[in-house]
Image (tube, rainbow, N blue to C red):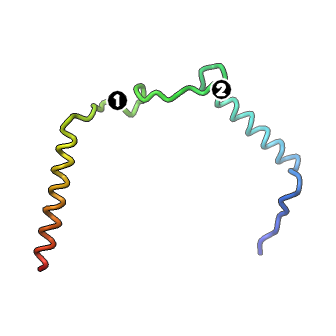
Amino acid sequence: MALYVRQDEERSELQQRIAADLREKQKKNSLDEGSGKGERSEFNGEDAVFLEGTKPTTGLAFVWLLVFIAIMIAIGLFLAFAKG
């Protein structure tokens, strides 16, 4: 059986201390990651590590998409007429 906990009870002293510690840690972490003024720095996709070694999409991406769609249609038609 589960214990029923009343939601209107006040927080215990331990819960209040834990919540205060977590708030402090959160403030400290957000200040360390920010610009030093307590503000969060904006994400800049250009300096992300995971973009290293990649290149932008060329104009042929649309052509490759059309080729892929045409192949899928051809496979679908082949399977449809092979059963009949």
Kind of residue at disc 2: Leu
Query: Residue drawn 77% across and 38% down?
Result: 21
Residue furthest out toward the top? 36
Horizontal and vertical percent position of residue 69: 19, 54
At numbered mark 2, what does the secondary structure look like: helix, strand or loop?
helix
Compared across the picture, whether 39 is left or right of 62 comes to: right
Compared across the picture, whether 63 is left or right of 23 comes to: left
Query: Residue drawn 59% across and 21% down?
Result: 35
Quarter of the image that includes the C terminus: bottom left
Out of 13 and 9, give the one closest to the viewer: 9
Quarter of the image that includes the N terminus: bottom right
Picture layout, residue 1 above or below residue 5: below
Among the two numbered marks 2 and 1 on one chain, the one whose residue lies closer to the N terminus: 2
Horizontal and vertical percent position of residue 47: 42, 25
Horizontal and vertical percent position of residue 11: 86, 50
Q: Which mark is residue 31?
A: 2
Out of 57 and 9, give the one closest to the viewer: 57
Label 1 crowding class (10 Å Cα cut-off): few <14, some 14-19, many 20+?
few
Compared across the picture, whether 20 is left or right of 83 comes to: right
Quarter occupied by residue 50: top left
Label 2 crowding class (10 Å Cα cut-off): few <14, some 14-19, many 20+?
some
